[in-house]
Amino acid sequence: MVTSSARIVSLVLQIATIASLVLVWQWAALSHPAPYLPPLEAIARGYWRLVQGDLLFVAVLPSLYRLLVGFLAAVVLGVIAGLAIGYLRALDPWVRPILEYLRFIPAVAILPAALLLLGPTDAMRIFVIAFGSIFPVLLAAIDGARRVDPTLLDVARVNGLSTVQQIVRVVMPAALPSIFAGIRIALGLALIMMVISELIAADDGIGFYILRSQRLFQTAGVYAGVLVIGTIGWALTAGLLAFEKRVLAWHRGWRGLTVASGNA
Amino acid sequence: MEAAVSEPVLFVDDISKRYAGGALPVLEGVSFKQKPGEFLAIVGPSGCGKTTMLRCCASLMQPDSGSVFHQGETFRDPPSWLSIVFQDYNRSLFPWLSVRRNVAFGLRDMVASERERRVGEALRAVNLEHAADLYPWQLSGGMQQRCALARSIVVEPKLLMLDEPFASVDAQTRIDLQDMVMDICRKMSLSTLLVTHDIDEAVFMADKVVVLSTRPARVVEEITIDLPHPRDQLTTKESPEFLRLRHHVFTSVRRQAQKNAS
C-alpha cells in the first residue's frame, strides 16, 4: 500500500526533476545563447500557437484528422479481417502467404510507392498511416480469434447462432483483450507514420510545420512541434487506456481470480 | 398407430466414432433410445468416451457411422429444443456477460419484457436472483453451474443434456444441485440425459441407466430404475431397492473396468 506521504514525496520529486531541467535549460539558453538552444519563452510561444493559436487549424487539426482516420481505418479493417481469418480456418491457405510477407515490410518503405500512386494528397498520408498501423491489430485479432475457448463456441452452436453471429457475439468479445494489446501498439505506429508522411510530402500538419521551422532555422518552432506531438501521443494513449479499462473491466476480474486462485 | 406419441426424443442408432484417422476407435456401435420425459443416465468407466458420445448425441459432432435421430430427424447442428450443461462451468459461461445476460444469451426474437420475465423465472428456479448482476468470476463453482443450468432451461428445451455437470463441485453442492436438477426436470417435464461417472448419482436421479463398456464404447446393459418419485437424498438412498440397483450398476461398471485393466 502506498501511503499518502509516500505519494506526496514521489510527486514532489517528479515536479522537482522537471523544474530543475527547465531551470538548467533556461540558464543555459540565457547565458550561452545558441541557435539550437532557444529560450523557453520562445518554445512556449510556439507551443501555445500550435495548441491554442493560429497554427491550431493549420498544423494540429489536419494532422489529427489524418491520424484518426488512418488509425481508425486500420483498427476497423484489422479487427474485421483478423476475426474472420482467425475463425474461418478455410481462409488460411489463401491469406497466410500474403500476410506473412507483407507484415515484414516496414511501413516507411511504402512511402515512395504511395506517393507515386496517390500523389501528395491526404489520401496518400491516410493510406500510409493505415498501412503502418494495421498489422499489430490484424495479427492480434487473428491470434485472439484462434484462442477462443471451444466450449464457448459449443455453447453458441447449441444456442443456434449462425457463423456471423458467433463471430460478433462470442469470438470478438473473447478476442478483445488481445485486440486491445494490438491497438495500443498500432497507435504508436500511426503517430510515427503521421509525422513521416508529413515530412516527406505535405503542405500542412505538424510534421510539415516542424520541417518548415527547421528550414527557416526557427529552432523554437521545431522543439515546440516535437513537444506538441508528444502531447498528442500522450493524450491519445491515455484516452485509449481509459477506454480499454472500461471495456475490459470484466477481463481484469476474470484474470485476477483465475491467476490468483490458481484455477485453470 | 404409435406416431409422434411414442416417438423417442432421442434415438442413437449404432453410432461409431474413431479419432486419429481410424486408429483410435472411441465408440463402436452404441445404440439406445430415450422416451420423451425420461431421465436417462449414462455411466461407464473413466475415459470410455462418454463425452464423445454426448457430443454425437447432441449433434455437435457427426459419428463416423450410424445415425442420431432427434424426434425422428437427423441434424447437422444441435436442434433448437436441445440444451446442454457442460462440465467446465468456468469455461462455458461468457466472462464478459453478467449472470443475467449469460442466462439471456439464447433468447432471441422476443420483446424485452418477455425476455426479462423468462430470465427472472430461470434465475428463481436456480436461486440466483440475488446474483443476477454479478459476473461469473465473482460466483462460487456451484453458483456458476446454476447459472449455466438457468441458461439451459430459459429457452424451454425439450431435451436437456448434462455432461458430468457436478464433477467439479464439492460434495455438498453436488447434493443441492442434484435435487435442483431433478426438481426442474420434473416441473418442466424435460427429457434429460445425464452423463456421469458417479454411479450413486446415476441411480438416484435416473429412470434408466445405460452402462457403457470401456473404450471402444458400446452399450453393455440398460437398467431400469423404478424407484418412486419424488426421491430423497436420505431415505431413497437407504432403501433396499436403491441399494440393490446400485449394486447391480456398480458390478456392471466394475466388470467393464476390470476388462480394461486386464
Image (spheres, coloured by chain):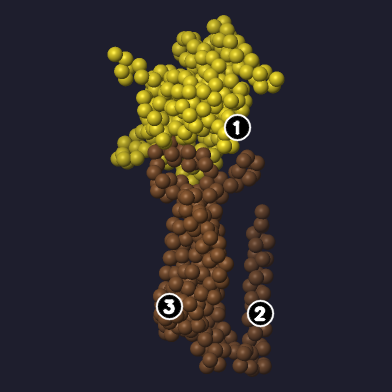
Chain colours: A brown, B yellow
Element at label 1: strand
Element at label 3: helix
Residue at (48%, 23%) from the top-left corner? Answer: B14
Q: CA distance from mark 2 to mark 3?
A: 46 Å
Does residue A41 show up?
Answer: no
Q: Looking at the figure, which quarter contains the C terminus of chain A?
A: top right
For marks 2 and 3, the one nearer the N-term is 2
Q: Are marks 1 and 3 in contact (CB under 8 Å)?
A: no
Q: Is residue A53 left or right of residue B213?
A: left
Q: Which residue is mark 2?
A: A21
Residue at (65%, 70%) from the top-left corner? Answer: A14
Q: Which residue is mark 1?
A: B24
Q: CA distance from mark 1 to mark 3?
A: 57 Å
Chain letter of mark 3 equals A
Amino acid type at circle 2 is Leu
Please determine if labels 1 and 3 lie on a single subunit. Answer: no
> Label 1 crowding class (10 Å Cα cut-off): few <14, some 14-19, many 20+?
few
Q: Is residue B17 left or right of residue B257?
A: left
Chain letter of mark 1 equals B
Q: Nearer the viewer, residue A174 or A248?
A: A174
Q: Are marks 1 and 2 in contact (CB under 8 Å)?
A: no
Q: Nearer the viewer, residue A67 or A123?
A: A123
User: Picture coordinates of residue B255 (x, y %)?
Assistant: 64, 15
Q: CA distance from mark 1 to mark 2?
A: 71 Å
Q: In the drawing, what numbered circle is on residue A117? A: 3
Amino acid type at circle 3 is Leu
Furthest toward the right, the residue is B262
User: Picture coordinates of residue B192 (x, y %)?
Assistant: 45, 23
Q: Is residue B25 left or right of residue A202?
A: right
